[in-house]
Image (cartoon, rainbow, N blue to C red):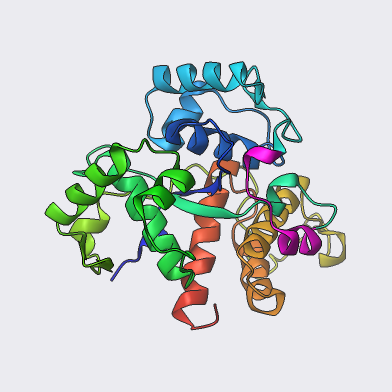
Amino acid sequence: MSSINNKRSVSVLSKSPDCPLTCKQLVTYSYMAYQSQFSKAKTFKGLGRYLCFSQDGVSEIITQLGAYGLVEGKDAIDPCPQPDWFVQSDALARRNRGKHWTRSIVNWRYFVRAPQSVLTFSETVVLSLLWHNHLNEFVPQYGYSDAYLVTVTGLSASSVPTAMQGLQGKQFLDRKDGEITLYEMDDEMLANFADPIQDTKLPQGAVLKVAQKPTGNVKVAPTANHVTIDPHTEEMVQFLTERMELLAIREEVYAPYITYCKTKYPGTVRENWPALSERILAQIEKQGQA
């Protein structure tokens, strides 16, 4: 059976009580901030495509983020001018010293809502946070109160109880007597979350093959010692490595998978790097190595 781990996601920066961002602003800014270390700014269309937001909606959100001083044009200002708006981890800061500022922030995964989903955006957000915490065996100190869900997600105080009731009515979970039970998701339930973006067009030279050398007078191809990994692929390796470390996966566990991706998928477009990381995580989980 498929897993929610294989779905498109955003590593959402955990907001502090001082952070004024709404949930959609938080999700959009988190994606922009994290991506800023790897690639140039995306278009409104590109952001909307990944997040499954309308292009006009993304434009409005970025305008709002600009008013908060977090973005300039279509770029997230780097480093964040409002670090106190997010929950920083001393342990992550020590582990990722010298790396991008997002690596020091506690985060949770928002599994992107599919356009045809029966879930509302608020329901998708709440369910994403619950599944993220469950998969990472994290239990909030004071439990899953509405106040906790509001603070972490940025949803309004009225949206959270409505979302919980909706999820219970649609049989994604059960909440009673202070206890929440998540129901295992079948393929029909998982269809409410967006799949990773796939790119069927491979760049020239993306496929490496081995064949018998032809006979006759032919030009000598470069030997293996002359083969280099292009900078684009090295950026992909860096992205995958940092994603694994952000999730506290041990190097001896993730390294073989990243090496495989480097040789199997060179030249993969940037927007598909998150999908590769989800595949690695799924394999790690399948092998019981997480």
| Extent of the magenta region | 84-96
Residue 187 position (above or below residue 111): below
Q: Splitting the image into 4 quarters, where does residue 211 fall?
A: bottom right
Q: Main secondary structure of the magenta part?
A: helix
Quadrant where the C terminus lies? bottom right
- Report x, y in % for residue 6: 41, 60
Residue drawn at x 49%, y 60% as measured from the top left: 278
Residue drawn at x 36%, y 46% as measured from the top left: 125
- Report x, y in % for residue 283: 49, 73
Find the residue positioned furthest to the left. Answer: 169
Quadrant where the N terminus lies? bottom left
In this orientation, does residue 189 appear?
A: yes
Q: Splitting the image into 4 quarters, where does residue 238 fall?
A: bottom right
Verify whether residue 95 appears in magenta.
Answer: yes
Residue 80 position (above or below residue 249): above
- Report x, y in % for residue 282: 46, 69
Residue drawn at x 46%, y 50% as measured from the top left: 9
In this orientation, does residue 211 appear?
A: no
Find the residue positioned furthest to the bottom. Answer: 288
- Report x, y in % for residue 212: 65, 70
Q: Is residue 269 left or right of residue 98?
A: left
Q: Is residue 149 left or right of residue 249?
A: left
Residue 148 position (above or below residue 175): above
Verify whether residue 190 appears in magenta.
Answer: no
Residue drawn at x 77%, y 55% as measured from the top left: 229
Q: Nearer the viewer, residue 93 or 215?
A: 93
Q: Count how many numbered circles sit on residues in the image.
A: 0
